[in-house]
Amino acid sequence: MDSYPVAPTLAPASPRILSVDALRGFDMFWIIGGAPFVASILQFCGPKAQHYLLPQLDHVEWEGFYFFDLIFPLFAFMVGMSVVFSLGKIVAQRGAGAAYGRLIRRSLVLFLFGIFYYGGLSHRWPDIRLLGVLQRLALVYLFTGIVFIHFRRCGTLVVLVALLLGYWAFLSFVRVPGVENPTPASRYAEGTNWTNYIDSQYLPGRKWDGKWDPEGLLSTLPAIGTGLLGLLAGLLLKNTATSPGKKFAWLIGGGLLCLLLGYGWGGQLAALITKYSGYQLPTAERYGYPFPVIKKIWTSSYVLVAGGYSYLLMGIFYLVIDIWKLRGWASPFVWIGTNAITLYMAWNILDFRRLTARLVDGDLQAAIQKALGDSYGPEVSHLLFATVVVALVLLLARFLHRRNIFLRV
């Protein structure tokens, strides 16, 4: 499974919107040991539960959407939210020039963090990865910030629609060089789409998938659209004229609308209607419909589906934490969310799994295996290992949070 970094909201959010920190921490949890931890618990479930739930902890190979395909776009979504809280006061008090200064500095530092994360200068050129997950978040933060400085809500919506429709139109109607007799399916298939082609021809350095990169050049444009969806959510939460109840309703309504549009555009709704009603809905593939939900090229339908789930999660967290004031359960997520960059880089450098092996491997694991036998020994050993990994990360997160130590850029 890929590893994903954090949104560049480096200082804790306002206590009045504690759910923002908690959701960021929830997202980060799945990167710093959460996925293996849950997978180890699922080992004790029945085959049917494992069949349906275990795949959700990995990525879809190409077309489709699993839970783990939400982790990265949720970060990008929260990057857009962070723009509102990190730049809003600066724009209001010091103007656009000062906001640009912070925007460029943070984007550059985050971009350099990304290069460092993938090995920095320990590799020789061309084995340095110039574009990766952190680098994409840096670009999303930069361009979402530019939109925030210069446009209001309606202008942001226009930019968002233009990005999604423009990306769809380019992939659907402009012929890829070298692809003979293109079919509707080949426009979005791996290796025969414009996104992969541009990476293979123009993206220097190491590419994650060999000839192209899932965080490559062209697909950064719709990723900015994901940031703009988060920007709109941030504007809503920061609006003091809107009641908390209405904010929750707008978040849930926006999420459902995005899911309807995304799955409709991707063809999933038509497939469901055909499956359960027997009625074959008309399609017009020669007109670029459906536009499949594909993470690796960040299709516009993927932006809407991931954005829809992001809105729903934000709405639920906001309801429970900031409206109902049920906050105790969210403390570990808040610890992680307020120090996400620190923990992400620590996860990369310290290697918590290796540290855990020094604590619970060897005689302890052998004793568990001997006591429980082949029936439950391996499962309990895996669960113990995954639990200690998560515990170590949480101990570090709690230590930093209690001492008000936050990484700032």
Image (cartoon, rainbow, N blue to C red):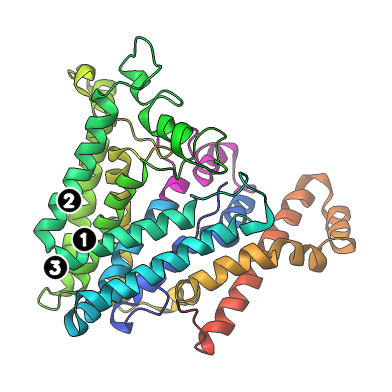
Q: Secondary structure at mark 1?
A: helix
Q: Residue at x 51, y 83 (%)?
A: 401
Marks 3 and 1 in Cβ contact (< 8 Å) = no
Judging by the rendered image, the residue that carries numbered circle 2 is 159
Judged left or right of residue 363, residue 170 is left
- The amino acid marked with disc number 3 is Lys
Neighbor class of circle 1 (other Cα within 10 Å; few <14, some 14-19, many 20+) is some
Front tag of 3 and 2: 2
Q: Are marks 3 and 2 in contact (CB under 8 Å)?
A: no
Q: At x 57% / y 43%, what residue is drawn?
A: 206
* Residue behind mark 3: 246
> Mark 2 vs mark 1: which is more N-terminal?
1
Mark 2 → mark 1, Cα distance in angstroms: 8 Å
Q: Which residue lies under the disc numbered 1?
A: 147
- Inspect the image, locate mark 1, and give the three-letter code of the amino acid beneath it: Val
Quadrant (top left/top right/bottom left/bottom right) for the C terminus: bottom left
